[in-house]
Amino acid sequence: MPETFLDATELVLNMGPQHPSTHGVLRVILKLDGEKVLGAECVIGYLHRGVEKISENRTWVQFAPYVDRTDYVAAVSNGLGYCLAVEKLLGVEAPPRAQVVRVILTELQRIASHLVWLGTHALDIGAQTPLFYCFRERELIMNIFEKYCGARLTTHAFRIGGLLYPLYHDFEDEVKAFCDMLPAKVNDYEQLLTANRIWVGRTKGVGILTAEDCKQYGVTGPMLRASGVKWDLRKAQPYSGYEQYDFEIPTGENGDTFDRYMVRIQEMRQSVRILKQAVDRIPDGPITAKVPKVLRPPVGEAYVSIEAPKGELGYFVVSDGGTQPYRVRIRPPSFINLQALDRMARGSLVADVVAIIGTIDIVLGEVDR
Amino acid sequence: MAVSPWEDELTRNLKEHFGEAISEFSIYVGQPFLVARPEAVIPILEYLKLEADFDYLVDVTAVDYPQRAERFDLVYILYSFARNQRIRVKTRIAEGYAPATAVGVHLTANWLEREVYDMFGIRFAGHPDLRRILLPEDWQGHPLRKEYPLTGVDQRWVRENLGIESAQ
């Protein structure tokens, strides 16, 4: 213990769980030397609802809506991952029409998720306008979801084996109109931020993660790509017919907050590219494979993962041959990416911690499950 | 769908190095996995990382089979960027057995093992910071054990910390 407070060099500062820039209920304990961060410890679990426990008490079909409530700003992606995992156990594949619709909806969801990220991240750093712009465009995606399946946020858009709802009559036109509109809007966001001196000052060189760090910490998604690793599950291990689409994997060089911003901006453009190709080739045919009314996957286990907006989202499912899952493990990208916060924050300033939490793109529903 | 044997260059090398410690190499629904003795798991992870490019630990999790003598399946999911291949390393451990931590091989194992400890009560030997991660530190019980009830709220914790009689 120091003799007087004036001798004290280290300060422990509590940030959250009620803090506007922690994106929910995340508590971070910071050890500071003046304004410099010496270490950051995350306290999580405030939103823990035990979805993995719930899964063992629901049937395979009944559990599907629960996964939407983990990463609730990208519910469609969660649903796709879970459906693919159960389909793997059942040995079923969704028919072509369902696969293309799944790609369209998950790419729309990726854009929506990135828009929420961009708006809130910019707001954290002090730019208010992008938030309103981003939510304006996201609203159009929400409208498409609402028209398609009646829900906007926790959509439960897919079913095991394919889809439940047929497409509404002007679905294609609305998606096309959205694709024509969005690129100009992304340019607008870039005009506000990319060369903005404050934005560059607050993001360049902040929260650096090298490619080696990313692999050590299991960090995936845009964070990994911003560190220069050209890896995307849609290309590496394609699912739902992603191998048929022509798109690029944007990467960064420095692995800092600015590069992660650029990667996500470019991903929105690539998603539009996929959407344009997909919407022109929705084949006719059934929207669901033949699956029995009561699902009893054979005894066994499988791990299936998809490229969710935040990184590798995996489902490890175990069946004992019954109607209920024996175990469902959700591999949450937010939870695992958040672990790197300490590494990224060390040596930076207190104010940068806000930028670093924002750049990880966490959703506490998924961190805590 | 049946379990088929898994045989390639990697399994031959692993057999040569670890011999009897690995009891099974199998593929189910196109996904390869191996079953090893618990004390061999960390050397296997290390070998796979250094010699076979499995440099990304995707996940660590457990499955509870209370009727079995070795009640827990401990599952490590690994991925190799260079090979674009995913494999699983599985082991079976009894109640009270403390498997060695994987933090020395993959830093990401830190939080993953904390979660396994929190949910199943499996203590990892040598873990640098083995505390609960999702539940409060003084919570009683491990929810993902099969005997733990679905609405198994720790009422003592609720009374002491929330100032209400019951959480139900």
Image: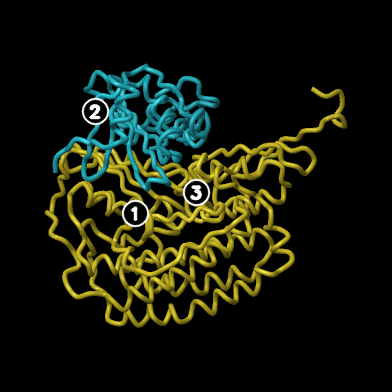
Question: Residue A364, which numbered label?
Answer: 3
Q: Chain of mark 2?
A: B
> How busy is the neighbourhood of tag 3: few (under 14 within 10 Å), some, or many (20 plus)?
many
The colour scheme used here is by chain
With B73 as the anchor, is A92 left or right in this view? left
Q: Chain of mark 3?
A: A
Residue B154 is at least partly visible in this image: no
User: Residue A111 placed where, x, y %?
Assistant: 46, 67
Question: Quadrant location of residue A300?
Answer: top left
With B3 as the anchor, is B52 left or right in this view? right
Tell me the residue at 39%/42% (across/down): B79
User: Residue A162 placed where, x, y %?
Assistant: 22, 62
> How busy is the neighbourhood of tag 1: few (under 14 within 10 Å), some, or many (20 plus)?
some
Q: Helix, strand, or loop for circle 1?
A: loop
Q: Name which residue type carries label 2.
A: Glu
The chain painted yellow is A
Q: Are marks 2 and 1 in contact (CB under 8 Å)?
A: no
The chain painted cyan is B
Q: Chain of mark 1?
A: A
Q: Name which residue type carries label 1.
A: Gln
Q: Which residue is mark 2?
A: B24
**Up-down relation of residue B91 to residue A241 (above or below):** above
Q: Helix, strand, or loop for circle 3?
A: helix
**Up-down relation of residue B39 to residue A118 (above or below):** above
Residue A272 is at least partly visible in this image: yes
Tell me the residue at 39%/31% (across/down): B119
